[in-house]
Image: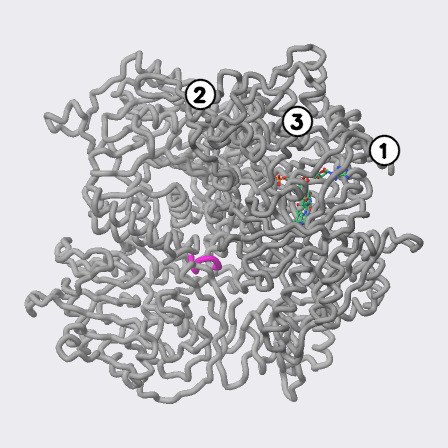
Amino acid sequence: MESELPNRIRVKLFKRHEDGLGFLIKPRTQKPFVAVSALVAGGLAEQSGLVHIGDTVLRVNEIDISERSYDDAVELLKALPVDAPVALILRGPDGYSTHLETTFRENGVPRTIRVTRKVVNNDSIVSRIRRTFSRASSASPNRNEGRSLSPCRNRSRRLEDKRTEGCFVDNQCCICDIDQNFPIVPNCNGTSYKNQRYQVKDAESQTKSNSPTIMSKNNSTMNHCDHSPTIVVTRPASQTDSDVTDADVKLRGRLSNTDRPTTVVTPGGHIDQHDNKKIEIHQNTEKITVVVKENGDLSKKHKGNMSTGKENGVIENNKLLLNSVMDNKSTLITNGEHSEDRAKQRRDSFSNINLYSPTSQRRRSSMAAVSPKKYVKLRNYADEKQVFTDTLHTKISQVVPCTNSKCLGSIMNHPPSRPVGEPRPQEELLTQAREFIDEYYTSIKRLNTEAYQKRWQEVESSIEKRGTYELTTNELTYGAKTAWRNEARCIGRIQWNKLQVFDARHITTARGMFEAICNHIKYGNNKGNIRSAITIFPARTDGKHDFRVWNSQLIRYAGYKMADGSVIGDPASVEFTEICQKMGWKGKNGMFDVLPLILQANGLDPELFEIPQDLVMEVNLKHPKFPWFADMGLKWYGLPAVSCLLFDCGGLEFTAAPFNGWYMGTEIGARDFCDAQRYNMLEVIATKMGLDTRKSSSLWKDRALVEMNISVLHSFQSQGVTITDHHAASESFMKFMENEQRNRGGCPADWVWVVPPMSGSITPVFHQEMLRYKIKPSYEPMEDPWKSYVWKKDRDKTKSLDRPKRKFGFKELARAVKFSAKLMNKALARRVKCTILYATETGKSERFANTLCEIFKHGFDAKVLSMDAYDFIDLEHEALVLFVSSTFGNGDPPENGESFAKNLHDLKSPKNAKNGESVSMSYFRMSTASDTDSPIENKEKEDEDDNLNAETGPLSNLRYSVFGLGSRAYPNFCAFAHFVDNMLNALGGERINKMGEGDELCGQEESFKLWAQDTFKMACETFCVGDANAIQEATGALSSTDFSWSPGKFRLTPEDNDKEVDITGSLTKLHGRQVQSCKLISIEQLQSKESSRETMLVRLDTMGAEDLNYAPGDHIAIFPANSTKLVDGVLSRLHNAPPPDQLIKLEVLQERTTPLGTTKSWCHFERIPVCTMRTAFANFLDITTPPSQAFLHLLATQSSRDVDRIKLENLANDIHAYEDWKAEAQPNLVEILEEFPSVKVNPSLLMTQMPLLQQRFYSISSSPQAYPGEIHATVAVVRFQTMRGVGPEHEGVCSTWLSRLQVGDNVPCLVRTAPQFHLPEDATLPIIMIGPGTGIAPFRSFWQQRKIDRDMLPEPTHGEKKGWGESFLYFGCRQNDIDHIYKSELTQAETDKSLTRVYTALSREPGVPKVYVQDVLKQNGKEVFEQILRRGGHVYVCGDVQMANDVSTTLCKIIQEFGKLSAEDAKFVMLKLREANRFHEDIFGVGIKSEATARDQAKRAWKYINAASKPTSGKEVVTPIPAAGICCLFPFFKTRTSVHPVENPDPP
Ligand SMILES: Cc1cc2nc3c(=O)[nH]c(=O)nc-3n(C[C@H](O)[C@H](O)[C@H](O)COP(=O)(O)OP(=O)(O)OC[C@H]3O[C@@H](n4cnc5c(N)ncnc54)[C@H](O)[C@@H]3O)c2cc1C
Ligand SMILES: Cc1cc2nc3c(=O)[nH]c(=O)nc-3n(C[C@H](O)[C@H](O)[C@H](O)COP(=O)(O)O)c2cc1C
């Protein structure tokens, strides 16, 4: 958005369904006829802050309406499509000036603000003061070239600066509006910043007189902001006038109001040379320090930001600022001095900037200067509308070497600032480290956090103690990418975020370097689909132990100088080729001999290595039209990998950091082959083309050049090797510039380098002004190492290496060549990190994630983390992340996935995050792949403009795949995993494998295995790791991880029996959550004895545990114990077991590699704490859930009879047999051991392989205020018969355990917050609670809370509304007399008005038709509609998912009927209710009936699929068929089989 004319702004809004563009208009009597009359509260116009009342509308989507009648314009506005962006040109109110400014926060996030000021010409005191000051500055010659610069354009750059505690300070051009009526621009506290002013003080005079040199007109306002920036100019006490340097005088002269010429200073930390003096500026977050340096030596050193103010000519500025370099006659302008008549000078000096454009270069004198403004406008001469405003250059870290009189823009390399090999001085390191750490933490939005402080302290103390420090992997990754981003000479930077960083800082030897480089090449090549990568070796320490790659590129051709002076091969390599030969390399004197690598580790003598031939990917050149082209035998390598630049990051210097991108064709076609000093092919080609080479005007060179380049592009493309042409590259660079402008306010660019070497002016970059400056991190040139290297053996003689003598023996060379692929893969395996994140509610996802980790360890540096233990910030820097997650509630994330989900959501929609909007859980649900037409998805589409695509999205470096666990008994199958998958993709992540889904009802484990195998293969392919062996090994791991038990691997050792087993403590350790002990107060039966069911009110004493504080709506998680009968059953079947009540320790035999060799020793296997066998089976292990197929397979190995073994193996291998068996018998461990009597079960096998016993959740049924220190639960006791009612009786673990507890018994538990199920904050709103059966549980806490609130609190008010909101309970049970739980409590609650009305639905009342809660809701439809939609009510549903869905459908119908809406609109309203967090669900699980139905259907479908097609090892994942009636079958067939879409094979 950019104003094109004064008082005009271009604003882009979105036309929304509800409130259109978000403003109202009214007619005007004169042109333009449309004016903004009001803003819709909360509408987009208001939110944007860019539209003001009184604006007139000039253009709408490029249509000029300024001349049109009001009615016409209204018609046009009305006709704009909904849900589409609209571009408006607005004119600010008359008498004001209006423009937009894009500002940047500390964290670099851009923000556009509108600045509207009254146009007043008052001659204020301040402006007079300013003019007084401006007299100090001599005018610079007018070099204005007619640029019109709006005087207000640079006025109020608004910065949000945490350090100013909420004040906006304009540290760019703070004084510009000093004589204006200040714009009403709210600061982040909502107050105006108009009174914040900078003070300029002469420290010396200040110490004497204690008064500032300049004061604002109003001291009180000036002091208004404690943090108003201050410039302090100090002079060392010792400094006499004769000591004062020129520049110093100039500084002081300016400040003391004398008119002297000055050369000073570019903003940022850099040095500007003037005569023989240097002024060095160090700018950090706190201040700028300027040190005047004479004859190249700093007269005083400074340390970090702790300037003493005693330095030679030091300017301190504790909030920063300081502008400008003028020419010889100009004077330093600080923000304290500027008047309107200076604006022209500023424009003039602006034109001094080194702008690299063809036109500007010619026009401008190439004087070294930096804008006195904090921005520079960069024009595009091909597109007048394309204007960039660079502010980034204010962060420059190093001046470009140009001077006031010379532009050195085309000089290739400049002399280094330090002698070769000399390490960076410590204070410089400290400053740069600070800047980098600040920048990094700003980028991850953690500046000034505790983590940041800690990190900085760590860095600082390391530098102080060791003279250096280490970057973390993330910092290194960020630094390497940013250095690329900053590289002014590179045209291909749009890819900067896609750089794969290989951290090779652990490497110590040349051989290690060689291996790493080979891996790098292999990764980069990627079979032609080239990927950018950098390998970073250890940083420079003392300068004597540098790591260097002596080659300028990893792959390059040799150049052999012949006796006659001619060169065979690449002339650019002659010098290096000679060095290789001197080191023993025997070239073949060919045109295209790949040079060996010369690698130097740790300052030792370099070593020479041949690159294995299969790693060198070469392209033979041919031409699409000229067959003779191929006969020339030209070829080129595919991987351009620069290895001679130093990676300068955070003050650390990485002297060996080879990196690669891919070629732009002209680099080969124009430069390598056609430069006269290179392969020089032009004439040869021209002759073959039959061109007239005698006169240049035939343009034979140009024509040959074009054909050469066509050949390069054609050959690369036809041989499948990535290459870009210069037009595409230029276009992408323009896009990059645009992105950079938007994202960080500028883009350093070197026109000389960026414009391609051929056809310059027909590429867009040619016409683009560019600003060349250097910011860190960066890649810097280094001197050729052989020029100064002293060979070890020559060191005594201190000879330099003019002629290296060292030769490699044959043996060493042979060894180098023999570098095997296997070794390479192993080395790489250690280097590619793979993070596996899981979110789980009942532990399965964690188990799967661990299995996945075992597989990935065969190729990667894999580790597993729970999503909530993961630092989300790291995601941006990850290369490979795998996700395994279940779905809970009704499409929600498991609890430990919630924060991750929120972070993902915020990353995708930062606007919501910024506004503090909560993420409705329904969001996840609606983000499933199948929901492409949902309004949510549409909303996502709206955000396409956000640039979150694979190229530039924040996660564009990430490769990922997701596996979802779920159950098709739930309508939102694997919804959370889909959400993660979709979000990552939308954020730019690259799926390496399609999302896998595992249905708990059918073949979950099988699906996982297939997905895991495929994912591993694809990850190996992606990262070029592993070979067939590794893949086989890993696949083996998949089948062996689950039963990696073997008899000799584990053992049980007896422990001292005096020790007590702390169950609660052990559970805490086991589950990684703080488990507390409650005591049972009482159990009360809630149903009559006549009822076939049992429901109880369980009351627990929290024993004062703070962790057990809760709010109504939260859950309690109870850790039960298995029934004594079952435990005894298991114990009696164990083979070779210690006595059941003996304390035992489970140990594992672990292998360790020590310097003395490999040793094996027994270590505690922490999965199970030290306890008795009885405790282990009672409290820690799940012995009731039917075991997995993997477990059955293991049991089969322990069977001594064939019949058992074969049957077990059949179950383990045949998914259908297994699913049938599991569904019918639901066998627990005891039953299995009975069914297979010959299985001699080893206790350690069970203890290591059985899943852990999980907690059960219960909706808390009490209010903490009604029952302080207590938690109540309403628990239905689970008892059922297997085999569809004819098998043995089974008991629910937790509910029956609770039912058997005695008063005072311990109940290990924890509280799980359910913020989505809390009472509304506005107590005046009506609430509708729907909870049949135990679904009533949480509502008991609600009505208790309401009673307390009514008794204790004043009547609530909310706006117009007053009084307690009504509350309606819809309860359901079978029979009124025997099943109506809490009947009397409910009657009482109605009486005391904590419930307005209770509706009871009876489903088995004798003689009465069945009624369910949804039926009653329907009957009350009109009221329900009123309560929810007219009166803003909240709906709460609790119970099983089937009931919840029926209720949801009923509500939808009610909304449709009484809202007179279409079915679709009614659904949309429901969705909105969910989004607004007004429709709450608390899902217990799936009802037994629907589970059985779903299971049956899934099983049949599964069989059908498998009959139709056996799983393949292709990309697609086997996805079991869903339960018909719940999901559509069709999409699942599509995924992996060639079977035609079919109807449900066996419809219910
Ligand atoms: C968020 C949340 C809140 C909950 N709140 C409550 C609550 O307030 N009150 C409450 O009572 N429960 C509540 N539950 C359910 C509760 O967590 C337990 O699932 C329930 O108590 C059963 O646990 P259990 O250990 O007794 O049974 P388990 O040992 O876990 O056995 C249950 C399993 O047995 C099988 N089964 C059960 N009945 C039959 C049958 N008739 N035929 C065949 N198989 C059968 C099913 O496979 C079922 O999954 C809630 C669940 C969640 C997730
Ligand atoms: C209360 C509850 C709600 C569930 N909701 C869903 C759901 O909405 N969608 C789904 O696909 N699976 C749902 N499931 C099934 C689980 O995702 C499935 O059991 C999974 O295997 C659990 O994996 P975990 O142990 O990693 O949590 C639910 C399970 C429970 C107990």
Q: Secondary structure at mark 2?
A: strand
Q: Residue furthest right?
A: 1407
Q: Is residue 834 left or right of residue 63?
A: left
**Mark 2 burial class by Cα count in 10 Å: few <14, some 14-19, many 20+:** some
Q: How many marks?
A: 3
Amino acid carrying label 3: it is: Leu
Mark 1 C-beta to ligand 2 under 8 Å: no
Q: Which residue is mark 3?
A: 1229
| Residue beneath the point at 64% across and 25% down | 1129
Q: Which residues are magenta?
A: 742-746
Viewer-proximal residue, 583 or 1066?
A: 1066
Q: Which residue is mark 2?
A: 1149
Q: Is residue 477 magenta?
A: no
**Res 1475 seen here:** yes
Mark 3 or 1: in front is 3
Viewer-proximal residue, 640 or 895?
A: 895
Amino acid carrying label 1: it is: Pro
Residue 863 in the image: state x and y as whole percent.
Answer: 48, 35
Residue 684 in the image: state x and y as whole percent.
Answer: 45, 30
Mark 2 or 1: in front is 2
Q: Please name the colour scheme applied to the rendered image.
A: one colour
Q: Give the position of the C terminus as an image quadrant.
A: top right
Q: CA distance from mark 2 to mark 1?
A: 51 Å
Q: Main secondary structure of the magenta part?
A: helix
| Residue beneath the point at 52% across and 25% down | 630
Q: Residue furthest front?
A: 1303
Q: Is residue 965 left or right of residue 766?
A: right
Q: Secondary structure at mark 3?
A: helix
